C-alpha cells in the first residue's frame, strides 16, 4: 500500500485556499445579515409612514345624560338635566365641557324642601386605544374635570317631633350654597350609527371648597350628587351626536 506524501508547498497552498474560503463565506454571511437589518429598518420606516400623520377632524359632539332621567324613578323629587360638549384638539386628546341645571321639590308630612341651581365642568379626556386611522370611533377614555355647582334652597316648613325636647315647628329661609370639586372619570364611547354615539362613564368626585348656610345643608347638589357624600362614585350614560365643522 502506497502512502501519499504532499510537498510542503502543496500543503501551504491548501491552507491559503481554506482561509480564503472561510473569509468569503463569512463575508457573504455578514453582508446578508447587514442586508436583512437594513431591510428590517426600511420596513419599519415604511410601516410608520403608512400610519397617517393625524390632523384632528373639526367637530363638536353634543351629548345628553340619560341616566339623570332614569334616576328620577328612584328619586322623583330630584330633576336634573345635563348636557356635554367635546372636541378632539390633538390626537386622542379631547377637550370636554359639561353643564346643566337641577331642581328639587320634596314634600313630606313633616317637612317641605325646595332647591334649584346650575352646575358646570371643564376638563379633558384621553383615548387609550391605538387608532390606526382617524375615522376609528371606538374610544376608551380616562379624564379629569374641574366642577362647580351653585344653588339656592329653603325649607318653608318642618316639624320635629322629639319625646325629650318636645315638638318644634318652624321654617328656614332661602339661602345660597356653592361647591367646587375635582373629578376623575373612565368610560367608553362607541359610534352605533353615522355620527350617533353611545357612552358611559364611571366618575368619582372629591370636594375642594364649599360655601353654605350654617342652618341648612343641601339635599342634592347639581352635577355632584347627594349633599352628604364626600366622594361619591356615580355612573353616567349618555347619547351623543357629532356635528362636523
Image (cartoon, helix red, strand yellow):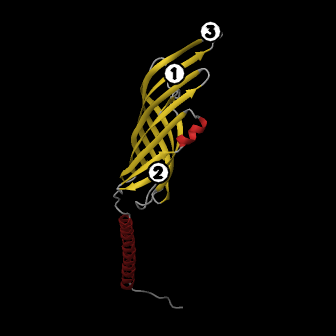
Give whichever of 231, 1 is nearer the camera: 231
Query: Residue 64's spot in the image, x, y percent?
Result: 47, 46
- Pinpoint residue 18: horizontal percent, then vertical percent: 40, 80
Q: CA distance from mark 1 to mark 3?
A: 20 Å
Q: Are marks 2 and 1 in contact (CB under 8 Å)?
A: no
Secondary structure of residue under mark 3:
loop
163 sits to left or right of 42: right
Circle 1 sits on which residue? 155
**What mark, if any, has residue 133 been given in the picture?**
none
Q: Earlier in the sequence, mark 3 or mark 2?
A: 3
Which residue, given by chain and number where applicable, does mark 2 sit on? 240
Is disc 3 surrounded by few (<14), some (14 to 19) or many (20+) residues within 10 Å? Answer: few
Which residue occupies the foreground of this view, 98 or 153?
A: 153
Q: Residues within 10 Å of mark 1 (few under 14, many from 20)?
A: some
Closer to us: 152 or 38: 152
Work out whether residue 188 can be spotted.
yes
Name the quadrant containing residue 243. Answer: bottom left
Distance in Å between CA atoms under marks 3 and 2: 54 Å
- Image location (x, y in percent) of residue 26: 39, 74
Image quadrant occupied by the N terminus: bottom right
**Image depth: mark 2 or mark 1 in front:** 1
**Residue at x 48% of width, y 54% of height:** 197
Residue corresponding to mark 3: 166
- Label 2 to label 1: alpha-carbon separation: 37 Å
Q: Residues within 10 Å of mark 2 (few under 14, many from 20)?
A: many
Mark 1 / mark 3, whichever is N-terminal: 1
The local secondary structure at tag 1 comes to strand
Amino acid at each position: 500500500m502506497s502512502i501519499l506524501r504532499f510537498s510542503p508547498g502543496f500543503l501551504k497552498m491548501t491552507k491559503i485556499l481554506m482561509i480564503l474560503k472561510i473569509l468569503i463565506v463569512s463575508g457573504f454571511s455578514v453582508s446578508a445579515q447587514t442586508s436583512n437589518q437594513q431591510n428590517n429598518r426600511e420596513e419599519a420606516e415604511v410601516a410608520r409612514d403608512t400610519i397617517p400623520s393625524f390632523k384632528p377632524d373639526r367637530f363638536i359632539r353634543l351629548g345628553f345624560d340619560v341616566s339623570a332621567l332614569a334616576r328620577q324613578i328612584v328619586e322623583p323629587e330630584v330633576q336634573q338635566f345635563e348636557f356635554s360638549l367635546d372636541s378632539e384638539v390633538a390626537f386622542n386628546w379631547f377637550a370636554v365641557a359639561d353643564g346643566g341645571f337641577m331642581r328639587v321639590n320634596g314634600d313630606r308630612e313633616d317637612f317641605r324642601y325646595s332647591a334649584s341651581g346650575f352646575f358646570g365642568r371643564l376638563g379633558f379626556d384621553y383615548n387609550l386605544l391605538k387608532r390606526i386611522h382617524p375615522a376609528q370611533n371606538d374610544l376608551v377614555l380616562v379624564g379629569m374635570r374641574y366642577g362647580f355647582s351653585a344653588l339656592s334652597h329653603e325649607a318653608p316648613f318642618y316639624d320635629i317631633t322629639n319625646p325629650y325636647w318636645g315638638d318644634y315647628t318652624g321654617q328656614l329661609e332661602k339661602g345660597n350654597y356653592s361647591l367646587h370639586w375635582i373629578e376623575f372619570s373612565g368610560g367608553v364611547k362607541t359610534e352605533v350609527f353615522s355620527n350617533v354615539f353611545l357612552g358611559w362613564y364611571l366618575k368619582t368626585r372629591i370636594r375642594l371648597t364649599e360655601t353654605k348656610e350654617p342652618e341648612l345643608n343641601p339635599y342634592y347638589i347639581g352635577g355632584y350628587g347627594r349633599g352628604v357624600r364626600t366622594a361619591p362614585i356615580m355612573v353616567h350614560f349618555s347619547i351623543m351626536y357629532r356635528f362636523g365643522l
